[in-house]
Image: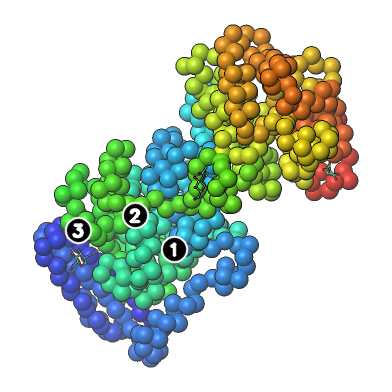
């Protein structure tokens, strides 16, 4: 089974289309003519090489089409399989670009209803950035980047090994994903300056008609825009079965091309009678994958466009999306319904959200611990099918609201609550220590505490006062989406401008509100309760749910990290003794 194909389509104009096709036997020395590119001509130069000893082209096509689909993925339901694995290369610093891409490609403008699992069969995406030295003092950017990572969970960091070029690192990364049981048909690599029509791409792949050619096996194709070493970084589509053969031939040298894919393409373009490893199909297609010519009018074939690269201005990305009617592709089922919670809310949507802050203070105290603490909560939410929502922007905006930054918590809860039935808030320095306990069972226990379903239906807020404290602890609480809650937050807490900077601020406002007759009857006040929802590390007893490291002074980072280690130990073997403080 040998049939190797190179296709090269070059063109600057769409009024003259021509294809030159050459067929020849592999072993003959007959070289196809190297054709001087005429500025106004389009060329397609497919080369078909056949070994006539091994059956017909059609049979090859049939065998090959079936074999590359991983058997594992279709049988093992635990291993997700995607049609497209999309890697978006990005610079760590370019947070705004990633926000733009999330919105324009996937319709993700916020994380109020987060994409916890990319669970559609269509696409799995990740931003991939080059790993860098982090933790620089007073680095606003690093804080923002960590917040983004905690909020979106769609960024991977990779460091190319040795002399690997970036594409090589990406291909290797896709192999690693496959080893960890994520499989896919096609790997699509774009950079953050490329607008891509994913729906159209998928349709073209399904039809097997790429660049006007019928491709016998799209899983063996390498489809890009290879005319220069800057167009090859815009968008490249690589069939799943092409990845390993390319990695196996990283030694092709080229002075002008660094990308392993370009080197592979150009090597075989320049050596047309050399067999292409594994009969890969190489497609150079600057008509569908175009470099932004600054105006849509200058695109030779607008209908052909799959991706436009080198678009550096955000408004142009938006405009291209509009003008080319590019639809967003939703990468997770929950986001097919992102309205506020109602009786009509999709069953796919979780009813409970676990919320925390992803805001990092300038003292950098939690720089290291924050992502790990967020992970403790994210995993808990994943385990029980809840949403995990961490927010930082509401903290940032307190500067303008003219309140202490801690009020961000109240803004964040007020914003997120309408999307869920119940919400549990944990400060960054509080962690789940018993992750087998569900919120449903906690609510059930609370129901018993207040004397039944009917009584509990009136409860909208659950908070504890630790023994010895003269005030509630607002680091952990549960709140129910209700008219009551809206009024409680608006009139009870937010209205307290007098506490904007003073005393215990939002906590004091909350404490005052739950004592007032209009809100008091609807609060489950866990008075002098150190174990139900809020436990200090030295008071931990087995079975406790959340440990809250709220030190009188100093940074809670190390105790939090230590606590998370203990959580893991307990989860591995529940009989382990834990030393106190937890
Ligand atoms: C496909 O063919 C059409 C019509 O001949 C032409 O306009 C277009 O540029 C071709 N597409 C590609 C990707 O070459
Ligand atoms: C590299 O690029 C230069 C300038 O475009 C060209 O003259 C030369 O032939 C290229 N070399 C190879 C190996 O393609
Ligand atoms: C890209 O190609 C040009 C010549 O066409 C060459 O001068 C340049 O060094 C190449 N860049 C890389 C990154 O290979
Ligand atoms: C729920 O759906 C029904 C029927 O489609 C509709 O009449 C009603 O307005 C919807 N309610 C809300 C709150 O969206
Ligand atoms: C977690 O909570 C469950 C249910 O209350 C309990 O059975 C279990 O022992 C607890 N585990 C730990 C490690 O505290």
Q: Is residue 575 left or right of residue 108?
A: right
Work out how far the residue at label 3 is from the one at label 1, CA to CA, in angstroms.
24 Å
Ligand 1 closer than 8 Å to label 1 CB: no
Residue 129 placement, left or right of 449:
left
Residue in the foreground of this view, choosing between 354 and 46: 354
Q: Quadrant of residue 237?
A: bottom left
Label 2, secondary structure: give it: loop
Q: Quadrant of residue 341?
A: top right
Give the image location of residue 129, x and y in percent. 47, 43
In x, y percent, where is residue 276? 37, 73
Q: Which residue is mark 3?
A: 301
Q: In the rendered image, which residue does mark 2 sit on?
A: 197
Nearest-to-viewer mark from 3 and 1: 3
Residue labelled with disc 1: 186
Mark 1–mark 2 Cα distance, whole angstroms, equals 15 Å
Q: Secondary structure at mark 1?
A: strand
Position of 436 relative to 472 (above/below)? below
Instruction: Residue at 59%, 27% (x, y): give it.
Output: 486
Residue 479 percent location from the top left of the image? 67, 31
* Mark 1 residue crowding within 10 angstroms, few (<14) / some (14–19) / many (20+): many
The residue lying toward the viewer, choosing from 409 and 40, is: 409
| N-term mark: 1 or 2 | 1
Asked if ligand 1 lies within 8 A of label 3, the reply is: yes
Q: CA distance from mark 2 to mark 3?
A: 15 Å
Q: Name the N-terminal-most of marks 2 and 3.
A: 2
The one nearer the camera, 492 or 66, is 492
Say left or right for 164 vs 350: left
- Residue drawn at x 40%, y 86% is 59
Q: Closer to the N terminus: mark 3 or mark 1?
A: 1
């Amino acid at each position: 089974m040998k049939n190797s194909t190179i296709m090269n389509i070059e063109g600057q104009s769409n009024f003259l289309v021509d294809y030159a096709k050459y067929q020849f036997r592999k072993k003959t020395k007959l070289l196809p003519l190297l054709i001087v590119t005429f500025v106004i001509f389009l060329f397609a130069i497919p080369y078909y090489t056949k070994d006539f000893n091994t059956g017909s082209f059609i049979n090859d096509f049939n065998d090959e089409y079936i074999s590359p689909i991983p058997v594992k993925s279709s049988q093992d339901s635990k291993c997700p399989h995607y049609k497209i694995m999309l890697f978006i290369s990005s610079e760590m610093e370019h947070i705004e670009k990633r926000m733009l891409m999330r919105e324009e490609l996937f319709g993700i403008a916020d994380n109020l209803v987060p994409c916890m699992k990319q669970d559609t069969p269509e696409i799995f995406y990740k931003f991939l950035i080059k790993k860098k030295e982090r933790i620089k003092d007073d680095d606003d950017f690093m804080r923002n980047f960590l917040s983004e990572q905690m909020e979106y969970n769609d960024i991977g960091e990779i460091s190319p090994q040795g002399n690997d070029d970036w594409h090589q690192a990406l291909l290797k990364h896709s192999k690693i994903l496959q080893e960890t049981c994520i499989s896919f048909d096609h790997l699509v690599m774009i950079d953050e300056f490329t607008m891509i029509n994913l729906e159209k791409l998928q349709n073209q792949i399904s039809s097997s008609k790429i660049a006007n050619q019928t491709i016998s096996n799209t899983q063996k194709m390498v489809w890009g825009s290879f005319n220069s070493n800057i167009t090859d970084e815009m968008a490249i589509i690589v069939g799943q079965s092409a990845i390993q053969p390319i990695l196996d031939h990283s030694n092709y040298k080229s002075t002008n091309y660094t990308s392993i894919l370009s080197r592979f393409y150009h090597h075989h373009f320049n050596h047309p009678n050399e067999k292409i490893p594994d009969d890969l199909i190489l497609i150079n297609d600057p008509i569908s994958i175009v470099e932004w010519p600054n105006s849509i009018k200058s695109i030779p074939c607008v209908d052909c466009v799959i991706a436009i690269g080198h678009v550096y201005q955000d408004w142009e990305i938006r405009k291209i999306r509009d003008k080319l009617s590019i639809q967003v592709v939703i990468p997770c089922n929950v986001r097919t319904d992102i309205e506020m919670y109602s009786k009509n809310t999709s069953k796919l949507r979780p009813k409970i959200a676990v919320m925390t802050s992803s805001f990092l203070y300038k003292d950098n105290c939690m720089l290291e611990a924050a992502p790990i603490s967020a992970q403790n909560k994210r995993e808990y939410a994943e385990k029980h099918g809840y949403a995990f929502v961490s927010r930082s922007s509401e903290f940032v905006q307190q500067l303008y609201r003219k309140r202490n930054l801690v009020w961000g918590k109240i803004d964040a809860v007020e914003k997120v609550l309408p999307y869920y039935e119940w919400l549990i808030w944990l400060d960054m320095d509080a962690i789940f220590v018993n992750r087998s306990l569900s919120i449903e069972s906690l609510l059930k226990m609370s129901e018993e505490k207040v004397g039944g379903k009917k009584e509990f239906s009136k409860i909208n807020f659950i908070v504890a006062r630790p023994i010895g404290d003269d005030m509630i602890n607002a680091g952990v609480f549960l709140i129910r989406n209700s008219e009551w809650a809206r009024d409680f937050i608006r009139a009870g807490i937010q209205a307290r401008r007098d506490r904007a900077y003073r005393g215990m601020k939002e906590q004091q406002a909350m404490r005052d509100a739950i004592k007032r007759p209009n809100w008091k009857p609807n609060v489950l006040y866990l008075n002098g309760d150190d174990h139900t929802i809020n436990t200090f590390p030295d008071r931990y007893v087995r079975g406790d749910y959340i440990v809250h490291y709220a030190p009188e002074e100093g940074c809670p980072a190390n105790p939090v990290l230590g606590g998370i280690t203990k959580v893991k130990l307990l989860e591995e073997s529940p009989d382990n003794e834990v030393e106190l403080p937890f």
